[in-house]
Image (cartoon, helix red, strand yellow):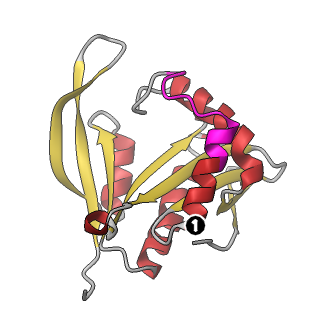
Amino acid sequence: MKVTSKHYEGNNQTFTIRFAEEKDAASLSKIRLQIDGETENMDREQGEGFLDEAAFKSVIAADTAANNSLFLIAETEDGRLVGYSRCQGGNFKRTSHRAEFGVCVVKEFWGYGIGSLLLKSSIKWADSIPLKKLSLNVLETNHIAVNLYTKHGFEIEGILKNDKQLADGQFYSTLVMGRHYNRDT
């Protein structure tokens, strides 16, 4: 499902939040690799699970065709991709009622509200289709993200204890969060 492009301003910068297109695949491959190296809040270390341009084209095509998936990008007014989010819907009948949300932003653009804009756009999309649940996983130490998700109706549903080992050698837990939609079946 496609969403309408929206323009936003923040910190003297104009951003567009829009649906990912095939032409974005090469840039998405580069910024995903960059972001994975900029923070330990992601599931991967830099270079792990690498997706090249062709892989991103496949993901974009699959999400475009699915009724329960959404792939958004954040772009500066000069055309630079600086973040993206994805709601990946379940492929099986038993999980087709839900989508898993993830977001990432290039570190240089943290604090511009881009993550929040991507989240709000994803929630608006989820509100408009017959999803029953939007879920996500977040590292317990990512307090800014946890607060943002809670502010937008997500609740902690569980804790995966000692789920990730970070660069300091310590193990950290992952919070499982969900936003439920009370809709008639």
| In-front residue for pair 97/93 | 93
Residue furthest bottom in the image: 184
User: Which residue has dot 1 on it?
Assistant: 65
| Magenta run includes residue 104 | no
User: What's under tag 1, amino acid-wise?
Assistant: Ala
The quadrant of the rendering that contains the N terminus is bottom right
Vertical comparison of 68 with 142: above or below: below
Q: Which residues are magenta?
A: 46-57
Image side of residue 117 versus residue 89, left or right = right
Judged from the image, the secondary structure of the residue bearing numbered disc 1 is: helix
Task: Give how far across and how far down residue 28 sits, in percent.
Answer: 66, 41
| Magenta run includes residue 53 | yes
The quadrant of the rendering that contains the C terminus is bottom left
Q: Residue at x 46, y 22 (%)?
A: 45
Residue 113 seen from this side = no
Q: Residue at x 46, y 81 (%)?
A: 128
Image side of residue 53 versus residue 153, left or right = right
How many residues crowd around disc 1 within 10 Å: few (fewer than 14), some, or many (20 or more)?
A: few
Vertical comparison of 160 with 134: above or below: above
Q: Residue at x 62, y 49 (%)?
A: 58
